[in-house]
Image (spheres, rainbow, N blue to C red):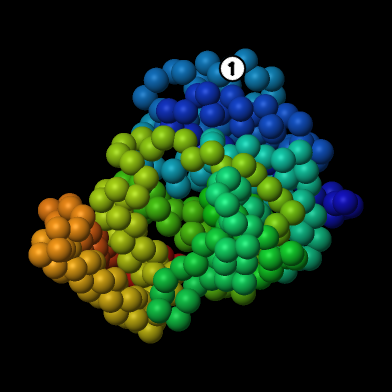
Amino acid sequence: MPQPAGTSASVVVPTYNRPDHVRTCLEHLSRQSFAPERIVVVDASPTTATRDVVRDVPGVTYLRNDRGAGSTATSRAIGVREVTSDVVAFLDDDAFAAEDWLEQLVARYDDPRVGAVGGRALNGQPGEEAEGADRVGLLLDDGSLTGFFAADPGRDVAVDHLLGANMSMRRAALESVGGIEDHYPGTCLREETEPVLRLRLAGWHVVYTPDAVVRHVAGPYAKGRRFDLRYTYYGRRNHVVLLARTVGVGDPRFRRNFGAVARQTGAEIAYAGRSVTRLWTRQGSVTRGVGNGVLRAGTNVAGTLGGLGAVALLGVRDGLRPTEVRGD
């Protein structure tokens, strides 16, 4: 596939405590059909294991992020500051790129209106190529987001946001919307969404191409497990912050999102109620069902309150009224 004349691209790999995954990730990057100008690994790990892996790979730059766990956006920002290429591509440390991955991403930048491009992250789940193929990466009217970044719609499609495991941005476009800031602690959910959504809201085109493929093996979390209550809390907390910093708290989508969460919380309570009825029919574990429903409902509420508190603090810090908390 022909590349835009003179377009250069670098790859940034944020990592925390996954040296074996980093080794495999770099092995796949070494076989790219379109050679990256730079490969930068930004390590927030508390040990030297990842540094030792990178030291043995020629041509790869190793940088430190001393903020540690829960600061993936900071690692991305450190990597962006290090490179000067036209395009900055991002890979998770547990995402292993196909040989033409970078070539496919860069090819979409021949349109000067394109500010970001991402691709498929295969999880090895049955039917993932079809699920949600007509709803990839959208910001909905109620402020929620669709994902489906393993889907294959059969063509390039316009989207609102991308998956951090497999995405890229035009460096000049990223700088034009304020770069990458880190307001997404804990599990770091939504940290990659903010800069891409900013680009989309600023009028740049954001493209999802099924031709740029990585295999996403979902390495272990720094703390806790995927989809546990901690994941639920930070997912909700960080989503409130995301909406405030992108569309703004005065936007109908920000307000409608609380209705969506209220419905979800009600569904969790209803699940707990149904579990009580099983007591009379002796079906399933009543204690577990009630506990899960109540805990998840409470965690959604706690995450919402935590997000609103974070938004208020950001407004105070920046000297803004609540309706201006956007981080422009």
Residue at image location 49% in from the left, 54% down from the top = 192
Q: Classify 327 as above or below 10.
A: below
Q: Secondary structure at mark 1?
A: helix
Q: Position of residue 267 (x, y in %)?
A: 26, 71
Q: Quadrant of residue 133?
A: bottom right
Q: Position of residue 74 (x, y in %)?
A: 44, 44
Q: Nearer the viewer, residue 246 or 172?
A: 246
Left or right for 80, reference 209 = left
Residue at image location 59% in from the left, 24% down from the top = 23
Q: Which of the image's four quarters has the C terminus?
A: bottom left
Q: Is residue 111 visible?
A: yes
Left or right for 90, reference 87 = left
Q: Nearer the viewer, residue 52 or 299?
A: 299
Q: Is residue 313 visible?
A: no
Q: Nearer the viewer, residue 221 or 26?
A: 221
Left or right for 54, reference 264 = right
Q: Classify 16 as above or below 143.
A: above
Q: Position of residue 85 (x, y in %)?
A: 70, 45
Q: Position of residue 275 (x, y in %)?
A: 17, 63
Q: Which residue is mark 1?
A: 55
Residue at image location 57% in from the left, 71% down from the top = 135
Residue at image location 54% in from the left, 39% down from the top = 217
